[in-house]
Amino acid sequence: MLKINEYFDGKVKSIALNNAKGKSTIGVMDIGEYEFGTSSVERMTVISGVLIVKLPESKAWKPYKAGETFIVAAGQKFGVKVEEQTAYICRYES
């Protein structure tokens, strides 16, 4: 069954699915700045737009464009700045 998630007063929304490739979410982020925490390894790929990301091990913000992927370890927090509505897919690894 699909699960709909909503965060930050509706500015971040995703649909979760679980299939042969594992657990994933496909979502969108509205313009804003967000901080997320991970419970498992997350592999995020930008589908459309740009995510400007501050990974836990970095002091600098880095833009990720459509087709680019970043990975965040389990038990970490990371920051995201969004300057235009952006779509992404997040794959969770155990």
Image: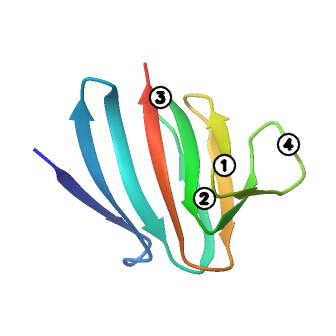
Q: Identify the mark at residue 40; answer none if there is no mark.
A: 3
Q: How much space separates mark 1 and mark 4, taking CA atoms?
A: 10 Å
* Amino acid type indicated by mark 1: Phe
The colour scheme used to paint the residues is rainbow
Question: With respect to residue 22, does 31 lie above or below?
Answer: below
Query: Upstream in the sequence, badge 1 or badge 2?
Result: 2
Question: Which element type, helix, strand or loop, lies under badge 4?
Answer: loop
Q: How much space separates mark 2 and mark 3, taking CA atoms?
A: 16 Å
* Amino acid type indicated by mark 4: Ser
**Residue 63 position by quadrant:** bottom right
The image shows residue 8 at horizontal and vertical percentages of: 44, 72
Q: How much space separates mark 1 and mark 3, taking CA atoms?
A: 13 Å
Residue position marked by numbered label 4 in the rendering: 58
- Seen as rendered, the residue at the extreme front is 67
Question: With respect to residue 85, does 50 lie above or below?
Answer: above
Residue in the image at 56% along x and 44% along y: 44
Query: Upstream in the sequence, badge 2 or badge 3?
Result: 2
Q: Counting other residues with Cα less than 10 Å from the Cα at mark 3, is it few (<14), some (14-19), or many (20 or more)?
A: some
